[in-house]
Amino acid sequence: MVSNKQWLSATTTAVGLLAAMFSLQLSAHTMTVVPSHYVQSKTGGWVSVDVSATNMTFQWDKGIPLDNFKVFTPDGQQGKVGSVYQGKRKSQADVELATEGTYRLELGNGSRFFTSYELKGERKRLMANKKDRAAQLPAGAEKVVTTQGNSRSMAFITVNKPSDAVLVLTNKGLEFQFDRHPADIVATEEVTVTLLMNGKPAAGVELDLSRDGELYRNEPERMHHKTDASGKFSFTAPVAGRYLLEASYQADVNNELADKVREGFTLSFEAALP
C-alpha cells in the first residue's frame, strides 16, 4: 500500500456556485468527470471520459462545453485531449494513455467573481469583482457582496505503475491530501483525508460521499462528513465501485477583489474489491 502521497490542488465550488462558473442553468447541478477506467495495466490504450452536470450521482443530466477540460500526464505536464463531443445529456472526451503512471483529468475555469445585491427587495447579481462592480451596480443597490469562486472537478487514472507528479500540493486555495494513492483505495478499508486552505488545515469543511446506483436504491445512502480541527476526516467505502466525493468551503475575506471566498471540489474515484 502506498502511504502519505500528496494529492493535488482541488479548488472547486459548492453546487450553488456552479452557476457562476459555467452557466445559470447549472446552479442546481453537480459537475462530474468520470473516466471509463480508473486503472489500466498497459500503455497505449484509451479511456472515454464522461463530463456532465448531474442531479443524481453518475446519472447524466446536462452536457457542457469542454473548452476547459484538461489532461495532465504522469510527468505533470498538460497533455493532449483526443476527440470531444458535447451532447444534450453529457459530454465526452477521449484520452490516450501513452505512458505508464498516474494521469489527472480535470474541468475548471479558475477564479471567477460575482457580485450579489438587492434592488427594491429583489436579489440580483452580476459578474464583477470589487474593483469593477462600482461601475456596473445600479443606483440604489443594497446588501452588496462580492464572492470569489474557484471550481474544479477531477478524476485520476493510473496505468500499470502509480506516480505522484500530478498529485503534488501547491499550497494555494483548497486542496486535499489522502493517506494513500488513488489507485490504492479499497472497499472496507478506512481512508483518511486532509483538507488544506492555502497550505493550512481547513477545519469545518463539509463533504458528501456518494456511490454509484442511487437511481436503484430507495435511500441514496450518502455519507456526510466534516473536517476536524486538523482538517481531517475519514471514510470507508462499503462496497467496491465508483464513488463521488464533494466538498464545499466558504469564508469571509477582506481584500481588494472580494468579500467572500467559496471553494470546493468534486472527485470521482474507484474503490477496488478487497
Image (cartoon, rainbow, N blue to C red):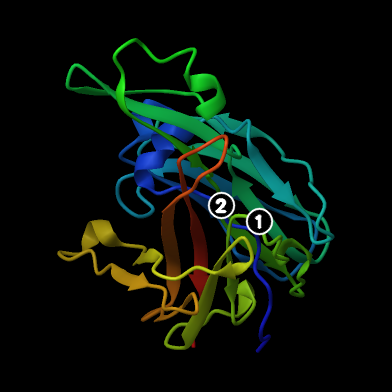
| Amino acid type of the residue tagged 1 in the rendering | Lys
Pinpoint residue 187: horizontal percent, then vertical percent: 45, 83
For residue 107, side relative to residue 99 (left or right) = left
Q: Is residue 184 left or right of residue 89?
A: right
**Residue 27: percent from left, percent from top:** 34, 36
Q: Residue at x 68, y 73 (%)?
A: 6
Please indicate, yes or no, whether residue 98 appears anywhere in the rendered image: yes
- Circle 2 is placed at which residue position? 11
Question: Residue at coordinates 79% horizontally, 47% vertically from top-left?
Answer: 78
For marks 1 and 2, the one nearer the N-term is: 2
Residue 22 in view here: no
- What is the number of the mark on residue 172? 1
At a point 61% along the width and 49% down the height, the residue shown is: 106
- Marks 1 and 2: CB-CB under 8 Å? yes
Q: In the rendered structure, which amino acid carries the disc numbered 2?
A: Thr
- Of discs 1 and 2, which sits in the foreground? 1
Task: Name above or below for residue 183 compared with residue 2.
Answer: above
Task: Give the percent coordinates (x, y) of residue 199.
Answer: 64, 66
Give the answer, above or below, for where 125 lies relative to 110: above
Could you tell me which quadrant the N terminus lies in? bottom right
**Which numbered marker is on residue 262?**
none
